[in-house]
Amino acid sequence: MRKTFGAIFVLVFLLAPSNAMAQQITADATPPVSPTAEALANLSAEERAELLSRLSDEQARVLLSAYLKAGAGSRADASESAIEQLEAQSERFQENFAAALSAAPQLPLLPALVYDRLTEGRSPLHPLWILVFLAVILGVGYGGERVFMRMLAPLKTRLAATVPEADFLARFARISSLLILDLLGLALFAATALALFLFAYQGHEPTRLFVLTLLSAFVLLRFVIIVSRSAFGLGDGPLRLVPVGADDGRTAHRYVVAAGAVGAFGFLGCDLLRMYGLDEPAHRLMTFVVGTLFILVILVGVWRARHGIADAILPRVEAGESGTSPLQAIVSLWHLPVMLYLLGVYGMAVFNGFSEAVSGTYAAVASVLLIAALPLADRLLCSATDRLLGSEAAAADASRAILRRAIHILVGLVAVIVLAAIWKADIFAVTGAGFGGRIARAALDIALTGFVGYVAWGLLNAALARHMPEEAEAEVGGHEGGGEGTTRAGTVLPLFMRFAQISIAVIVVMVALSALGVNIGPLLAGAGIVGIAVGFGAQTLVRDLVSGLFFLIDDAFRRGEYVDIGSVKGTVERINMRSMVLRHHLGPLHTVPYGEIQHLTNFSRDWVIMKLVFRVGYDTDVNKVKKIFKRIGQEMLEHPEMGKDFIEPFKSQGVKAMEESAMIVRGKFMARPGTQFQIRKELYNRVQKAFQENGIEFAHRRVTVDLPSDLDLSPEKKKEIAEAAGAAALADDEEKQGRP
C-alpha cells in the first residue's frame, strides 16, 4: 500500500507542472516559439488541436519531428527498462537466495525462539499451560460440533440415501447439502473455540498469536478434510463428485489431507515466526522449505492417483472394443502436463518470492482450479438438460446430443474468457482496427451467429419432439374408411417446424453476409418486391396458402384421416404448404391444392355407424333374429382384438321393410373409425353361421311379372318384357336400400 500511494503521489507531482504548462500554452495569445515534444505529449486532443492551429508550418514540422523522435526513444527506453528490470530481479533473487541459505544455521534455534517469546513475562511452564488450554477449547468446540451433528443425523441419513447413478444433478444436490451441513458443524466448532479463547485471553500478545495461528491452521485443515471427503465419497453413503473407485479415492484423500496439513501449519507457522521476530532471510528459507515439501506432497499424490483419474476419464472416450486408441494413450498421460505445470507454478512462486517481484501465483492457481471445475460445470449443465428433456423422451435423443455439444462449446468459451480475465489478457484486442481486425470481427460474428442458430435449431427440435413423441410412428397407410388420425399437434407442428427451420437458416445467412460487409438492405428490399410481385401474379398460390391456413385452424383434417372432397377421396398422407396428399384405398396418390376444396367430409372423427341388412323369409321369427343379433354382439365385445374397437355393440333394428319376396331385417353397431370394415366381415360370418344353426334361411331376390292373358305375344317377347321389369325392380330395391 505504501508503494502504491507513493507511486500515485509521484505521478501527481510529475503531472502537475505539465498541466500548468498546457494551460499556459493555451492561454497565450501568441504561439510559443519552440514548444517541446514533452509538452505536446501531456496535452489532450483538443489542446493539441488548438496549439497546432496557432503554429506556423515550419514550427509544426519541427514539433512533429521532435514528437516522433521522443516516441521512438520512449519505446526504446521501455524495452531497455524491461530488460533491466529482469536483470535486477535476477540479481535480487541471487542475493536473497544466498542470504537465505546463509540463515540455515538459525533453523535449529526456532523452537527456542518460540519458547522465549511465549515465556516473556510468564513462568517457564506457560507453554505447557497454553497447550493444555488449547486442547480444552478444541475439545469443547468438538463436543459442541458433535452434539449439533447428532441432531442433524436423521437429515444426513435421508440425504445420503442412494440415488440413480445417471441422475448427476440429484447426486450433486445431495452432496452439496451434506457438505453444507458438515461445514456448519465446522463453523460451530470454530466459533465455540474462538469464543472460549477470547473469554479466557489475558492480553499476552505472543500467546494470542500462537493460539490464533494454531486454531486457524486446525480449522483450515479440517475444512480441507471435509471437502476432500465429500469430493471422493468417503463420507455418508456412496455419493462422490470425483468418479473414482473407493481405493483410489482413499489414496487421493490421504495426499490431499497431507498437503493441507503442510500448507496450513507450515505457511501459517512461517508467518507466526516472522511476527515473533524472525529475520527476513530465515523467514524466506522457512517458506522455501515448506513450499518445497508442499509441492512434493502434491506431485506424489498426482503420481499415485494417475491411474484412478485416467480410469475415470477413459469411459468417456470413444474407442474400439480392442486395443488402445491414440486418444486413450493421451488421456492416460494426463499427469505429465499437470506435474510440469505445478512445477512451473512452484518455480515462478520461488523466483517471485526471492526477487521481491509481483507474484503471479494467484493466476496460476486460479487457472488450475478453473480447469478442475470445468468437468463439474459441464456435467451439471448436461444433467440439467437431460432432466428438462425427460429421461424417456426417446424422440429427443438427437436434440439432446445437439444441446450437449452446445453446452460443451459454451463451457469452453466461458473458460477461455475467464482464463483471459485471470491472466489480464485482452482477447478482444484482436478485433481492433485494421484489416486483420475486420477479419477477426467478421469471423467472430459469424461464429457466434452460427452457434446461436445451432442452439436454436436444437431447442426447436427438442421442443417439437417432446410435444409429439408418437406422431412419427403413426400409420397413415390408406384403406377405405380411413382410421384414427394423428393429433392436431402432429398435423400442425411439422409445418411450423419447417417454417421455423427456414427462418433460422435465412437469419443466420443474412447475419453472416452482414458480418462479411455485404449490404443486406437491397436484398431485403428485393425480397419484399418479389413477394409483392408473387402475391399479385400468383393469386392461386395465395388462395391455396390462405385456404390451407384456415383449414388447419378449423382442424378440418389431420394426417392419417380418411376424407372425401367430392372428386377424390383417400387417407391424408402428407400436408404441404399449399396442398394435401391423399392416398386412395386402391393405391393411387392424389395431390389436391387447398383452394380447390369446396367441401370436405371427414370419415375418421370420433365414431362411425355401420348398418347391416339381411333378407329373410316371411316365416322367420323376428324375436329369434333379435336374440341372435344380441348374442353375437355380446360375443364380439369379448373378442380379444375387435372388442376394444366397439363403442356400441351390434344389435337388431327390427324389420326395415317388407318386399315381394323377402322380409328386410337390419342391425347396426358403432365403432372406432377405420375398424368398421373388419368388424362387418366378422359379423357377416357369425350371422350366417348362427342362421344356419337355427334353421333360418336367407331369401333369394325374386321378381314376379304378370302379363295380361289376352296379350298375343311371342315367348321371346314375353321373356324380354319380364327381364326388363325384373331389372327395374332390382334397381328400385337397391335405391331403397341406399336410403337411411
Image: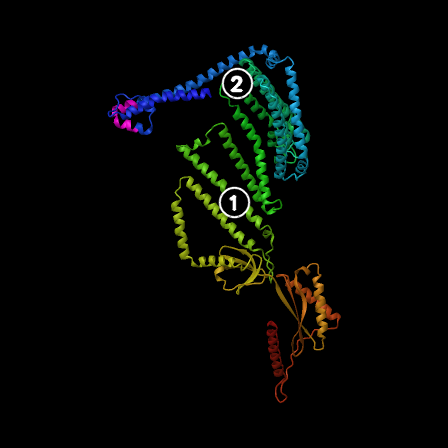
Q: Looking at the picture, tell me which residue is in the foreground, 334 or 267.
A: 267
Magenta-drawn segment = 49-63
Q: Inspect the magenta stretch and tell me whether residue 50 lies in it.
A: yes
Camera-near label (2 vs 1) is 2
Residue 115: numbered disc: none
In the displayed structure, does residue 415 sit left or right of residue 525? right
Q: Quadrant of the C terminus?
A: bottom right
Q: Residue 614 in magenta?
A: no
**Residue beneath the point at 70% across and 71% down:** 626
In the shown orientation, is residue 13 left or right of residue 282? left
Mark 1 or mark 2, which is nearer the start of the sequence? 2
Give the crowd class for mark 1: few <14, some 14-19, many >=20 residues within 10 Å.
Answer: some
The chosen color scheme is rainbow
Quarter of the view holding residue 366: top right
Q: Can you tell which quarter of the image residue 692 is in?
A: bottom right
Where is residue 98 drawn, in percent x and y? Answer: 53, 11
Element class at badge 1: helix
Residue 68: tell me if it is visible.
no
Q: Quadrant of residue 294?
A: top right
Taking the spot 62% from the left edge, 82% from the top edge, the residue there is 716
Residue receiving disc 2: 353
Q: Which residue is mark 1?
A: 457
Mark 2 packing: few (<14 Cα in 10 Å), some, or many (20+)?
some
Does 160 sit above or below residue 697?
above
Residue sitting nearer the eye, 726 or 540 = 540
Looking at the rendered structure, the kind of residue marked 2 is Gly
Above-or-below relation of 617 to 101: below
Residue 550 visible within the image: yes
